[in-house]
Image (cartoon, rainbow, N blue to C red):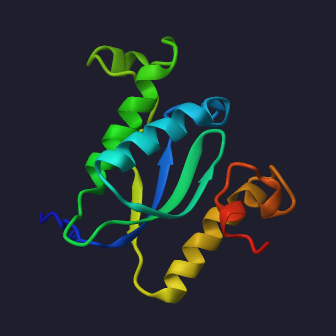
Amino acid sequence: MSSYRRPRIAGATIFFTVNLADRRSNLLVRHVDDLRAAIRQTKAERPFRIEAFVVLPDHLHCVWTLPPGDCDYSLRWRLIKARFSRVLPKGATRLSHDRRGERGLWQRRFWEHHIRDRRDFDAHVGYCWNNPVKHGYVENPENWRLSSIHRNAAP
């Protein structure tokens, strides 16, 4: 049995989906300022450009572009998750994580997709912005306040 490992591409643009362990939680929207702080601190230490971002109660989607010569998005996610988890009150952990000394707020893995071209980029940015509509939180993407669509909207 062979294992295939996707190559990491320096300076790539990547779509991510990152989930909380408890998919019924609303922790991300309740503590969005803490999440923003974790992202801001990580970005300051290990720069990347946020092309699109949306935060939902139990998961988030985003598109990042890494700097030329850099392909370590896993470290960035590890830092963001750890920083966010550290500032939250204890009690949101799962027993399996407690045994390893982990907080257990996040699913261990995340989904990533390397953007191939402009059409792929536009589709994934649109997916980010339309996700609150897909989940029934709002009727129009512009009505979801925790989205970068507001940053990109024409005045």
Outermost residue, right side: 139
Q: Is residue 109 visible?
A: no
Q: Quadrant of residue 73?
A: bottom left
Percent coordinates x, y for residue 6 in the rendering: 23, 69
Percent coordinates x, y for residue 89 in the rendering: 52, 14
Q: Is residue 43 visible?
A: yes
Q: Nearer the viewer, residue 116 or 95?
A: 116
Residue drawn 28% across the image and 72% down it: 11
Q: Quadrant of residue 80?
A: top left
Residue drawn 40% across the image and 50% down it: 110
Percent coordinates x, y for residue 14 in the rendering: 40, 68
Q: Quadrant of the N terminus?
A: bottom left
| Residue 70, above or below 38 | below
45 with respect to 92 (left or right) = left
| Residue 155, above or below 89 | below
Residue drawn 77% across the image and 53% down it: 144
Residue drawn 48% across the image and 48% down it: 18
Q: Quadrant of the C terminus?
A: bottom right
Q: How many marks?
A: 0
Q: Nearer the viewer, residue 124 or 46?
A: 46
18 with respect to 54 (left or right) = left
Q: Quadrant of residue 26?
A: top right
Percent coordinates x, y for residue 17 in the rendering: 49, 55
